[in-house]
Image: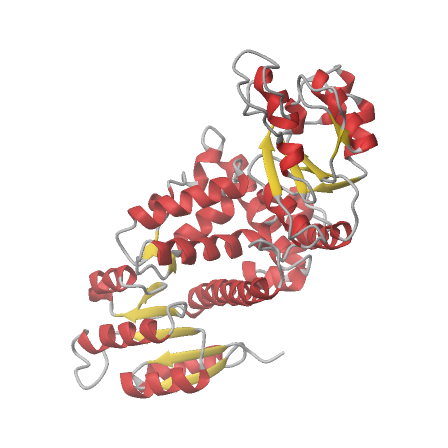
């Protein structure tokens, strides 16, 4: 593999040479002394990360040329990561640069080891955003209803969708609230021969029990008080297509019997009706409940469970899709920024860390809501943890002793690094800035198995 491309924009020849020798082994370096030559390299070589000195000729004593270079670079590619290098007395200018879209800043004299860590994170985030672009391109070619994911768990979900879409068997989709169960159902329908026909959705937990039977099966005129006309139910409106029963675990036992009969015979009876009506509709169901426990407690029929779950697709919670979280967050940020016409170029490094550390109990729905709000409320060009209303990850360690909190933080960092590099200990150690033997010692001390 070729080394990632790094552009160093620095008019001080001694510092430029120092950075060149310190970083040449890890990166394909490009050097520029001024704004115009930097932009020329940017257009021809397309580096994803840049270090930028604010004091550039023709006025190296000021910062105007540096800020102009920053604006030009972000205008050329809004996702480029610019790390500002500035003198000790210019920290206010560096913070201003962050507000205008820079990824991070360093004060001179440069500590090379610290710079390497920040560069590593910048390239990591850049790679995620590149994968997101590629995924969005793929989504325009593959009808997966906007579902994003590169994790092995989502790979299995996509594979299952392709397999079951060509059949007519009932499918049970299980997963926590907010994981995207309806999106999976839509994807199955759109990839099936039934795609030209209706996709009908009903939430079994959102309709009062005394109205649910009529909603599902319809009724005849005069069959009950208020039934002034004949009405078709959702089964009939799904004729030829797909009926998606969301929150199937909330379906009352009496209606479970009628649903079971439909699955066996493909026939229904309207309320007050005396004739059977044949309906050709495929049934997909979803739940966030443990149906096996509901069966044990007498709240769900076991025969219906096995009829519905000929094939079961398990949707993983977002916290188990660590490699997908930033991909999803970046895609949602771009979507909502475009919808709201906001010039937001990405997340601050603190926001990225907060996103990675959060447990996402509300899953993708929570992620969508937080990012939508952040885009509306953000005042700068990058979203902050405050915009996302994400509590500091250190809150989880409050009330613990220093030793316990330190070990907990180390454990979190190590597990996430290993997960990001898919179990590659060498790469994880490099990201964490320790040797492989040291990382193995830490893993043993903290009880972390390599398989995690």
Q: Identify the residue shown where x is 67% and y is 42%.
A: 242
- Quarter of the image with the N terminus is bottom right
Q: In which quarter of the image is residue 320?
A: top right
In the image, 317 versus 447, the foreground residue is: 317
Q: Quadrant of residue 264?
A: top right
In the image, 9 versus 193, the foreground residue is: 193
Q: Is residue 424 left or right of residue 407?
A: right
Is residue 26 placed above or below 451 in the rendered structure? below
Q: Can residue 219 be seen in this view?
A: yes
Q: Position of residue 47 (x, y in %)?
A: 45, 78
In the image, 284 versus 448, the foreground residue is: 284
Q: Identify the residue shown where x is 27% and y is 63%.
A: 100
Q: Quadrant of residue 85?
A: bottom left
Q: Where is residue 370 in the image (x, y as percent from the top left)?
A: 41, 43
Q: In this view, does 176 lie to the left or right of 37?
A: right
Is residue 418 placed above or below 201 in the rendered structure? below
């Amino acid at each position: 593999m070729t080394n990632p491309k790094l552009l160093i924009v620095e008019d001080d020849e001694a510092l430029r040479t120092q950075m060149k020798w310190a970083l040449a082994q890890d990166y394909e370096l490009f050097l520029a002394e001024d704004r115009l030559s930097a932009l020329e390299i940017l257009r021809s070589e397309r580096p994803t990360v840049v270090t930028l000195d604010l004091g550039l000729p023709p006025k190296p004593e000021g910062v105007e040329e540096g800020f102009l270079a920053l604006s030009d670079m972000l205008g050329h590619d809004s996702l480029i990561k610019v790390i500002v290098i500035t003198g000790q007395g210019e920290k206010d200018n560096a913070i201003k640069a962050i507000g205008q879209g820079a990824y991070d800043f360093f004060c001179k004299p440069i500590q090379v080891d610290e710079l390497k860590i920040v560069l590593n994170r910048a390239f990591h985030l850049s790679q995620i955003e590149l994968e997101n672009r590629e995924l969005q391109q793929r989504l325009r070619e593959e009808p997966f209803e906007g579902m994003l994911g590169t994790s092995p768990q989502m790979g299995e979900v996509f594979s299952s969708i392709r397999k079951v879409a060509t059949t007519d068997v009932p499918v049970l989709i299980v997963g926590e609230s907010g994981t995207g169960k309806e999106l999976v159902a839509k994807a199955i329908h759109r990839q099936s021969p039934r795609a030209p026909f209706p996709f009908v959705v009903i939430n079994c937990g959102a309709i009062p029990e005394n109205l649910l039977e009529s909603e599902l099966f319809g009724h005849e005129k005069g069959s009950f008080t208020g039934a002034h006309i004949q009405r078709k139910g959702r089964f009939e409106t799904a004729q030829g297509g797909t009926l998606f029963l969301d929150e199937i675990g909330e379906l009352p036992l009496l209606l479970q019997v009628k649903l079971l009969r439909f699955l066996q015979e493909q026939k229904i009876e309207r309320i007050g009706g005396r004739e059977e009506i044949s309906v050709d509709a495929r049934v997909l169901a979803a739940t966030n409940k443990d149906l096996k426990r509901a069966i044990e407690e007498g709240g769900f029929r076991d025969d219906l469970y096995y009829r519905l779950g000929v094939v079961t697709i398990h949707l993983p919670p977002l916290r188990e899709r660590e490699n997908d979280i930033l991909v999803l967050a970046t895609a949602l940020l771009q979507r909502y920024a475009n919808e709201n016409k906001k010039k937001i170029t990405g997340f601050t490094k603190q926001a990225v860390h907060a996103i990675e550390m959060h447990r996402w109990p509300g899953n993708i729905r929570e992620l969508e809501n937080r990012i939508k709000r952040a885009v509306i409320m953000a005042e700068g060009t990058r979203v902050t943890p405050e915009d996302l209303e994400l509590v500091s990850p250190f809150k989880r360690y409050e009330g613990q002793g220093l030793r316990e909190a330190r070990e907990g933080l180390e454990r979190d960092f190590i597990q996430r690094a290993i997960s990001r590099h898919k179990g590659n200990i060498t790469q994880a150690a490099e990201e964490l800035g320790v040797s492989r033997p040291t990382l193995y010692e830490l893993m043993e001390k903290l009880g972390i198995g390599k398989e995690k």
